[in-house]
Amino acid sequence: MTALLQVKDLQVRVEEREILHGLSLTVNKGEVHAIMGPNGSGKSTLSHVIAGKPGYEVTGGEILFNGEDLLAMAPDQRSAKGVFLAFQYPVEIPGVATMTFLRTALNAQRKARGESEFSTPDFLKKVRSVAASLNIPQDMLRRGVNVGFSGGEKKRNEILQMALFEPSLCILDEMDSGLDIDALRVAADGVNALRSPDRAMVVITHYQRLLNYIVPDVVHVMSKGRVVKSGGKELALELEASGYAQFEDAA
Amino acid sequence: MNVALTRAEAKSETGHAPSDAFAVARARLPGTAEVAAARQQAFDAYQRAGLPHRRMEDWKYTDLRMLMREVLPLAAAPDATALARAGAALKLHAIEGARRLVLVDGVFAPTLSELADPEQGLGIRTLREVLETGDAALHVQLPVPDNSDAMVALNSAMMTDGLVIEVADGAALTRPLHVVHIAGGATPAAMFTRSMLRLGDAASATLVESYIAAEGAKAYQVHDSLLLGIGDGARLDHVRLVEDGREAFNISSSVVRLGAKAHFNTFGMTSGSHVSRYQAVIAFAGEDSRVETNGVNLLNGRQHADSTLFLDHAVPNCASREIFRAVVDDRGHSVFQGRIIVRPKAQKTDAKMMTRALLLSDEAEADNKPELEIFADDVTCGHGATTGALDDSLLFYLRARGLSEKQAQALLIQAFVGEAIEQIASDALRELAISAAERWLAARG
């Protein structure tokens, strides 16, 4: 097994308040990890720090991605290296056409990796085939990024990007929030189609429900800024039955 | 005695005595005796006022005594070298299929222009020709828009050349008219131009104005004015792109009058020049007419750009829309003054104005001054103004998808100004504006 992501004793502050108090996590290629935990346990903070969102101060520990110091990289460099965060709340960008955005992003990543840029016909072909597999109508691609999209459409647009950019690490931050059961199934099918021996996924969620659709190899429970328990997929079911309270005491 | 002394002091604030410049240039200024007399009157009006300054409400944010200090001497007529340099610069704003009319250093350049084979109903003359031959009908309008504004008065006194364009009733011009102002000379100088377009009833035309510089043109001044008459049922599309050199001054005024059931769509973008001011007075003279006036300022370094618009709803049942966007980086300064007056008779006026500024640095400045003066009681009027920075959450989303900081900013800036640029009806002209915006973005690095 090759460690793709190694988070070691990570300590993070936001505006003088420590959110993560020495979090450690190792994710190998080909694995799907679920991170569960109550509100305020630091799940989203972890995803933001991995993606490089400004406003978080790392006061201790490190994050290695393929052995490289991830924290030393700008968000766009992380993206080019293969880190992808599917946002809990994807933003709306009026005036930027989805196609323009996808193309600019894809070519920026390829350029940063020293790869040639996609030609227009190749790019269009690729987007169309991926969009079709996710039931994303062409009309959605012509609109501004996420503008007027429903919750389900926004999440599908995230998965579309994931399929297009082919990252080696996908972090899905509360992918199930705001989705009804049908939308959840479509999104989960899209994610499952991307499972591969070369790609790892970190699925962040409150609820076990999502894990019926995206079955994890490893489940971690977070509480108060630490991973307090790790186990197999049965741990998620255990949590569903007994709740988070037992772990809050442990932390 | 005391008063006289104060006035003398006030005058000395304007810096170099422009009366010398006028006296020296006078012999070179075209026109009949009647024109010469009008020039003298206009110059006297300018002399009394001097360069506009911040204590004058209309010029509050653009103090020319501070920013410009002096009016440069009249530019020499372009020689072969200047014309060659100007010719080479034309490609920056090339428009496929347009009829190009070029003014180099304020003088019409026939060799760079296209006067042959005018379309049916199109008449083009130079201002010089009209002033010298004495077209009585035009003389009434040409020299006297409103010399109460000092810069218009100065332009009235000094105007050397320009285009006088007439479009006959019912004529629909398919080729855009493209007036290109180029600074070609290497010595600092001022050019004074005035153009006029009269669009007959039910006629339609597209007018593009470009302000660019030949390579090597340094500190020069553009003093331009434009008179537009739009006949009943006529439509004029107007695009104005200021991409002057970064040491240049551009002081331009427009006076627009619309007949009934007329339509005027105008878009202006300033991404060049050091200091610029564009002042437009648009008056509705006939009912059921519509004006869309949109603009963009893209500024960085120490650029200063002022757009001052005055919409005069004098008659009932007219509509106006103003969309203005400013993007200001470094120590740039953008000014937007939008005044809408709805006169007592102008019932059922529908006037809206929205201006938004995006500040990219802590030292950037944007002044928005919307003013509504409503004297009629059955109208729909509104205005809004916002100023802010780029949204961090949008920037992070784009960067998380692989865009560099500059790329992410560029995409959001393009989207921000896009709403104004989209209002340009013609695809080719929209592309021209977009490419000018892209040049500005590319220059940011």
Image (cartoon, rainbow, N blue to C red):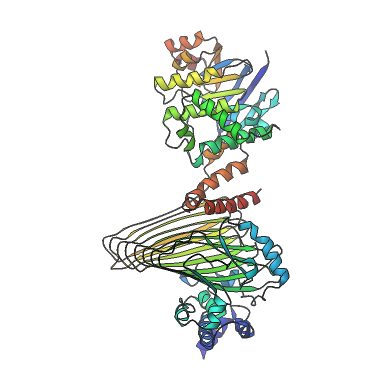
- Quarter of the image for the N terminus of chain A: give it: top right
Where residue B25 appears, as percent x and y from the top left, is 63, 82
Count of numbered circles in the view: 0
* Residue positioned most to the right: B81
* Residue positioned most to the left: B378
Where residue B216 appears, as percent x and y from the top left, is 71, 64
Where residue A225 appears, as percent x and y from the top left, is 54, 23
- Between residue B270 and residue A129, name the one nearer to us: A129
Q: Is residue B187 above or below residue A165?
A: below
- Between residue B73 and residue B371, name the one nearer to us: B73
Residue A162 appears in which quarter of the rendering? Answer: top right
- Between residue A103 and residue B385, name the one nearer to us: A103
The answer to whether residue A47 is seen in the rendering is: no
Where residue B417 appears, as percent x and y from the top left, is 51, 50
Residue B312 appears in which quarter of the rendering? Answer: bottom left
The answer to whether residue A107 is seen in the rendering is: yes
- Between residue B381 and residue B203, name the one nearer to us: B203
